[in-house]
Image (spheres, rainbow, N blue to C red):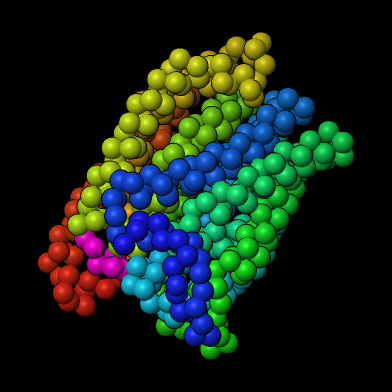
Amino acid sequence: MAEVIKEKTLKTSAGTATKTVIRDMTVGSPAKLILSFFLPMVFGLLFQQLYNMVDTIIVGKYLGVGALASVGSTGSVNFMIIGFCIGVCNGFAIPVAQKFGEKNFTQLRKFAANGAWLSIAFSVVMTTVVCILCRRILKWMNTPADIIDGAYCYIFVIFMGIPATFLYNMVSGIIRSLGDSRTPLVFLVISSMLNVVLDLFTIIVLKMGVAGAAWATVISQAVSGILCLVFMAKRYEVLHMTREEAKPDMVMIKILCNIGIPMGLQYSITAIGSIILQTAVNGLGSTFVAAMTAATKISMFFCCPFDALGSTMATYGGQNMGARQLERIRHGLRSAALMGSAYALGSFGVLYCFGDKIALMYLDAGQVEILGHVREYLLANAAFYIPLAFVNIVRFLIQGMGYSKRAMLAGVCEMAARATVGFLLVPFFGYSAVCFASPFAWIAADAFLVPSYSKIMKELYKNQETPEYRPCLGH
């Protein structure tokens, strides 16, 4: 059987045949499959980071360091809330990947439908709650008085766009579960280009300040989500469902919640540690906030391949768990680990040689003190990119296999590590402690994830012919 199945005939809900382009990751070379799925994923994430970088560059260059600090001070709370949304959507897509691996397309459609119902409910509730609490959260974080108004204007609009976040991530997650990582890339490119145009228009022409950058992000993501939804409806007839298949099913909703909520909490719990750390940085003053903002943006760009490997392994693990291919899961982990480690070494070399020059995209050459702080942060993080690679690869792999609760516990380890640095080390060592907070968190997560993965595989090999082997249980 070919690795990439072109024009494969599948049975639709109406009983007719359809032709579509999918990628079956349960057969063929694991390394080749992972690489072919990974490349569109990483390009998509790079484009996503590109328009995030453009936001920051335009804000920093046209609105000043104060506005840059305003946007940067919301980074951790933004990650906590939006990360929860993304994690939940990724979790809802996991049973779809598993049922694809089983070739059970009726169940696949039912899981997709129930995931959509849950996404609507979650988006309404979350948008209402976080918008009401938005300013209070910023005050709890000890956001400096000179930037809190700008921070509120920015993050409130981002939170208003939570439904758009759910729309894009739910639709793209389902598409990736079918083995298609290219289609979400196309619409991310469109979103990125639109975001750049809207950034310039809202900030320079309409003079909307930091709120303009937020509206540009929300609008571009909404457009991308709608286009992706229309494409999915037309292209993937295997997802066309009967009214019966589209009805809410409490059993499936429970399964989806058992997987999706822990995945969402994983992001949020990790972000709590980041919020504590951000609060500590806020106490150091707006100069350090601006430095961390610029450094974080650069670091996120360089970390895109790790995120892409993680998302790749979630789909790979889900499909192969559904097909009961344990050896393929082990081989896939080995291949991904080699890819991640090679990239980690290369990216450290680039940041060591050119990190301070890259920072000039966000800051002026005369801001020597801030540039020095940016370089310190980048090198401290890049030196530990190999542990970060394993965090993403192993965590997302076991999530795809259905063990999202165990993956969530790794987030607890990260939170505890960052909180320890924020509470205990920053008061004594200042910004230098901040620079090593993430490496400390990655090592803590790996200390839990690697033994947990080994235990999971040992249990699965022992019970692969018993009901305990069944995926989609949200262990």
Farthest residue toward the left? 462
The image shows residue 278, relative to residue 458, as above or below, that is: above
Comparing 57 with 146, the one in front is: 57
Which corner quadrant of the image does residue 260 belong to? bottom left
The image shows residue 472, relative to residue 137, as above or below, that is: below
Which quadrant, please, contains the C terminus? bottom left
The image shows residue 82, relative to residue 241, as above or below, that is: above
Farthest residue toward the right? 206
Residue in the picture at 50% in, 19% down: 355
Residue in the picture at 35% in, 63% down: 319
Residue in the picture at 60% in, 49% down: 186
66 left or right of 437 in image: right
Comparing 208 with 278, the one in front is: 208
Residue 17 appears in the figure:
yes
Picture coordinates of residue 225 (x, y %)?
64, 58
**What segment is highlighted magenta in the picture?**
321-326
The image shows residue 170, relative to residue 248, as above or below, that is: above
